[in-house]
Every structure is written in structure tokens, then in C-alpha cells.
Amino acid sequence: MTIVRILFTPIAAAALALAAGDPKAGADLYARACKSCHGADGAPNPAIAKMMKVEMRHLGDAAVQSLPDAKWDEIITAGVGKMKPVKTVNAKQAADITAFCRTLKK
């Protein structure tokens, strides 16, 4: 059992590191793919919300921040409600955007 732990722990740590996004890379991607609707600081664009007839939450709000990273990544790549998927973003880039959005926490 100990040998399994010794072998598995570094592999698991490496996998988690790869899964975690890069907030610096995510900031650039966010600026290109998300900022027009979600604002530079995560505050929703009121004109977009009005046009789409939706209530958009600040990305830094506690309820939004409580979503697991996998859910953020899914929303970015698959969309949710009236939000369309971001087709210009792959899974790694979605993780980077998610990591950046975590920095918007209020």
C-alpha cells in the first residue's frame, strides 16, 4: 500500500497541477472572449443583460464563486441559459479563464 501511495501521489499532484488553470493566461483570454459581456472586473454589462433579458451576476459574487471549477469550465465551453458556448476556447483555455475569474472574488 505504501509503494502505491509513493507512486500515486506525485502522479496525482502533477495531474492536479495540469488541471489547474493559469490566471495570467486566463486574464488575456478573458479580455478577448468574455469582457464584452462580463466586464473587465466581472461586473455584467447592463446593455447586454437588458438586450438578452437576463439577470447577470457579478462573477465575483459568492454564489458564482462557489461553483466548482469543472462547472465554470463547462459553462465556458458549453454555455448555459442564453449564454452561448465560447467556441474560440479549448478546455485548457477554459481552465485558465476559470483561474482568472477566481481572482475576481469579492
Image (cartoon, grey):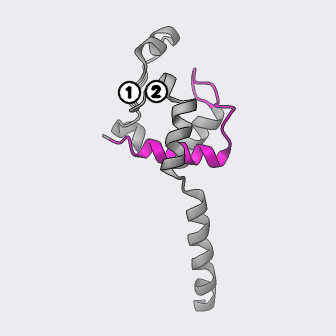
> Which residue reaches farthest left?
106
Q: Mark 2: which amino acid?
A: His
Residue 100 point in image, percent of width and height: 47, 44
Whether label 1 touches label 2, CB < 8 Å: yes
Magenta span includes 103 = yes
For marks 1 and 2 on the same chain, the one whose residue lies earlier in the sequence? 2
Taking depth in this image into account, of 98 and 3 the one nearest to the observer is 98
SS under mark 2: helix
Q: Report whether 12 appears left or right of 27.
A: right
Find disc 2 in the rendering and name its residue: 38
Which segment did they paint magenta?
Answer: 79-105
Residue 86: image quadrant is: top right
Residue positioned 41% across, 37% down in the render: 64
Above or below for 93 versus 48: below
Q: Residues within 10 Å of mark 2 (few under 14, many from 20)?
A: many
Residue 13 seen anywhere in this rendered image of the structure = yes
Residue 41: image quadrant is: top left
Residue 6: image quadrant is: bottom right
Residue positioned 68% across, 33% down in the render: 88
Find disc 1 in the rendering and name its residue: 43
Magenta span includes 104 = yes
